[in-house]
Amino acid sequence: MRFYHLFSAAALLSATTLWGQTWTVGNTTLTESDLVTGVNLPWELLWGPDDHLWCTTRPGEVLRIDPSNGSYTTVLSLNVMNNGNGEPGLLGMAMHPDWANTPKVYLVYCTGSGWNGEERLSAFDWNGSALVNEEVLLTLGAGGIHNGSRLLVLPDHTLLMTAGDLGTSSNAPNLNSLQGKILRLNLDGSIPADNPFPDSYVYTYGNRNTQGLALGPNGLIYASEHGQNSDDEFNIVTAGGNYGWPDVQGFCNTLGEQAFCAANDVTEPLMAWTPCVAVNGIEYYDHPAIPEWQNSVLMAVLGGLSGAYERLSVLHLNADGTSIESEEQFFSSFNQRVRDVAVNPYTGAVYVAFNGVSYPGSGPNIIKEFKNEAFASNVEWVPEGPQLTAFPNPNFGMLTVQFPSTSSTSRWEVVSFSGKRVAAGTVQKTEWTINTSAWSAGPYFLRITDGNRTQTLTFTVQ
Ligand SMILES: [Ca+2]
Ligand SMILES: [Ca+2]
Ligand SMILES: [Ca+2]
């Protein structure tokens, strides 16, 4: 939980004008700053329900970063397979959606050495200062390449995990193998009863090495997937889908592919990139802080083996999110592999993790912040304040809110994780209810502005 108060925008603007390089996005100016420097191979960047920025590093550390100043603590150190040349290590991360009651962090990491290790999906308890009590939920193969491992919690509180083909392409179409798939689990590691194949973790197949996952509008799930030499892909994830690898690369556009696609109901990507640019972490952006990027997917692009195409791509979506209308590219001039991206749900600032100049990456690296100061400068975090509560959480239709003071200036609003305001009103009583029954499932912020102070909590609608 965080509290805000308004302060002098003029003072901050003059300071950042002095210190930050700026980037122009249409009518918006983004100020660049180095949030964290000297970090070795940041892999997953995640905005946590504790309002900190969490980061995994491929050599095995989990960092919990204060987004206001970049200071961080190392909350877990793992011994991982990290052969220096390849792709394994500590990789994907996700948080339990009911954080207030179940503060668990999910991690994927590779153990062992060489090309025949083990990849573990584990849950850890957050005790307020460290990740403890590892519980291994699932093990599969790990290798020098194609370890997948991106995680995403869905609104129904199941967990998607991407699993790479480990360099053996015949794994991908084989429904008896967990490699070359997107898997779906319950948060306790069991198989969801409504998975597309009975008693199987498999959610999609025919995937080579998917390393980007994000929730989009209208319940859509997006994925980015590495191609071999051609056809990096951006896909919509649908239960039971066959994504074609290794028989089809990208679109069904050769004679052989067309025959295979017709016989095997292959799902084609929304977009493909040839030659490969190495697509990675993705995040749906709809925050008003950068209006030019609303309803887009921000995609980290590593740049391929030659390191020629590194950038943050902005994939502008159509109104319902089912197609890409255009791609814009930013930050190529750093000549740094872009591994992952995260969004501050309050300020709309974008965090970008860099991974060195060439494949497979080397440290030290920087996590940069790109922020529209004109939008963000009227709020500042302060540590304490009066207690805002809301229940039940998760919520099934009616949210009861309690706030121990009212005044003629107190306002409340509910904002989705992507920054859209879905409800608002004036605080007239110390307890009231909000009807959530028509809202999309997912996480929301409840925010109360009381005089010069704002207080926020997160809750989930199921
Ligand atoms: Ca991320
Ligand atoms: Ca495909
Ligand atoms: Ca093709």
Image (cartoon, rainbow, N blue to C red):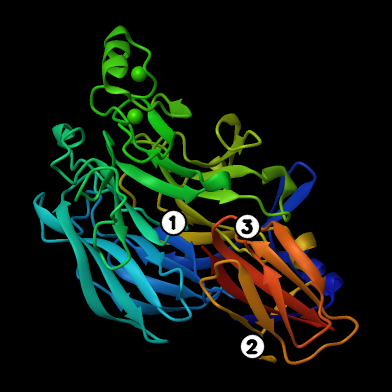
Q: Quadrant of residue 234?
A: top left
Which residue carries the number 3 mark?
A: 439
Element marked by disc 3: loop
Which residue lies at the image location 43% right of the left edge and 29% below the top edge? 269
Residue positioned 47% across, 63% down in the render: 46
Q: Percent x, y for residue 235?
A: 43, 35
Could one spot residue 55 in this view of the protein? yes
Numbered disc 2: secondary structure:
loop
Q: Quadrant of residue 227?
A: top left
Quadrant occupied by the N terminus: bottom right
Per the image, the residue denoted by label 2 is 383
In primary-sequence order, the first of circles 1 and 3 is 1
Residue matched to label 1: 154
Closest to the observer: 21 or 168?
168
Task: Look at 60% across and 63% down and name the residue there.
Answer: 344
Disc 1 versus disc 3: distance between alpha carbons?
Answer: 15 Å
> How far from the left and from the top, in percent, is residue 209?
29, 41
Type of amino acid under label 3: Trp
Specify the amino acid type for callout 1: Leu
Is mark 1 in CB contact (under 8 Å) with mark 2? Answer: no
Which is nearer the N-term, disc 1 or disc 2? 1
